[in-house]
Image (cartoon, rainbow, N blue to C red):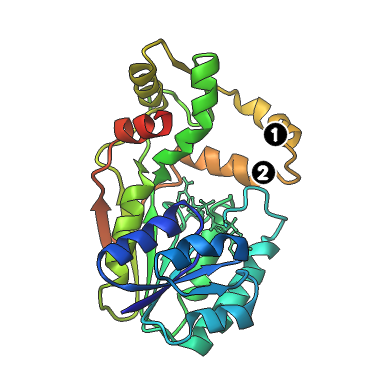
Amino acid sequence: MNYAITGITGKVGGAVARNLLEAGQAVRAVMRDASKASRWRGLGCPVAIADMADAAALTQAFAGTDGVFVLLPANFDPSPGFPEVRTILAALEAALLAARPSRVVCLSTVGAQATTENLLTTLGIMERTLGELPLPITFLRPAWFMENCSWDVTPARESGVIPSFLQPLDKPFPMVSTIDVASVAARLLQETWSGRRVVELEGPSRVSPNDIAAAFSRRLGKPVRVNAVPREAWRELFVAQGMKNPAPRSRMLDGFNEGWIDFEAGVTGSLKGTTTLTSVVNALLA
Ligand SMILES: NC(=O)c1ccc[n+]([C@@H]2O[C@H](COP(=O)([O-])OP(=O)(O)OC[C@H]3O[C@@H](n4cnc5c(N)ncnc54)[C@H](OP(=O)(O)O)[C@@H]3O)[C@@H](O)[C@H]2O)c1
């Protein structure tokens, strides 16, 4: 079988491709930046150059494939009304309709179904738009990535204090490693199904901000603690980081903290990965 993988130069897409190659499948590497092609050519993958907003290039990239993995670029600072993702989705919709792959797996998120507007609304828009396509399509909704802890490496090492927007600090949140996300996505791509389905995925156990500090502390061999960043300071902090429209990001964090961003009862599949927080943190610190 032959699979086109978008986002292949990033964490999840790259690992999806490696899983497929290990399973003996053919992979077409879809990327916007030709300077990153040689690594994938070296693994025997034909390369298609396509920006996610370029319908014609995406059509060529997807043509003649058995399956397509769709990964929307993350955008922490979307404009009001989410025009950036709507442009990408218009291109993807046109390309998938023209190329007609046998099946599509899209990376979505926990909470894509939430009705309160927040950063994850972009993936809700994706599910509603691409879910209308007359193709077998799966939306994989993973929890918060454990690899987001990469932001914590420098503060843990340098000051022993990790700032946390997830609060309260002892609340266990659903999290999952991108290792598990990629292996499940690769498996789903190789399945046969009809219509639209949703698969939700979290790690082997839920993780609190205090658990993250403890994992860093164990590995670094020194005390590490988390510090809750006060809600009233977020806006100013995000603007100082260069964000123009910080409300969606703040509302996403509210959604996790208040519990209205969560898994949806009654979806097709609910899976658990096996990769632990300890192994992810140890790898980040290696
Ligand atoms: N972080 C979380 O907790 C979490 C949880 C659930 C779901 N998600 C979803 O996971 C996705 C991010 O996955 P990731 O961590 O693997 O991302 P990543 O490592 O940042 O990789 C992003 C990929 O998108 C490509 N890309 C960016 N803009 C593009 C464009 N205009 N055209 C074509 N390709 C473009 C990048 O290519 P370049 O190498 O050229 O930049 C890269 O291959 C997002 O959709 C996010 O919503 C994240």
Q: Provide residue 69's location: percent of width, then percent of height.
A: 43, 69
Contact flag, marks 1 and 2 (Cβ < 8 Å): yes
* Element type where label 1 sits in the image: helix
The residue most toward the top is: 223
Give the quadrant of the C terminus: top left
Is 27 on the left-hand or right-hand side of 97? left
Q: Residue at x 47, y 57 (%)?
A: 112
* Element type where label 2 sits in the image: helix
| Mark 1 / mark 2, whichever is N-terminal | 1
Give the quadrant of the N terminus: bottom left
**Where is mark 2, residue-wise?**
247
> Looking at this view, is 120 or 40 the one in front?
40
> Looking at this view, is 165 or 113 the one in front?
165
Give above or below for 279 relative to 68.
above
Query: What amino acid is found at the position of numbered circle 2 in the picture?
Result: Ala
**Where is mark 1, residue-wise?**
235
User: Crowding at label 1, few (<14), some or many (≥20) Cα neighbours within 10 Å?
Assistant: some
Is 123 on the left-hand or right-hand side of 259? right
Q: Residue at x 51, y 58 (%)?
A: 9
Is 141 on the left-hand or right-hand side of 10? left
Q: Provide residue 227's location: percent of width, then percent of height.
A: 52, 18
Choose top left, top right, bottom left or bottom right for residue 139: bottom left
Q: Residue at x 66, y 26 (%)?
A: 232
Give above or below for 263 relative to 54.
above
Q: Provide residue 242's location: percent of width, then percent of height.
A: 75, 39
Whether residue 47 can be seen here:
yes
> Looking at this view, is 131 or 179 the one in front?
179
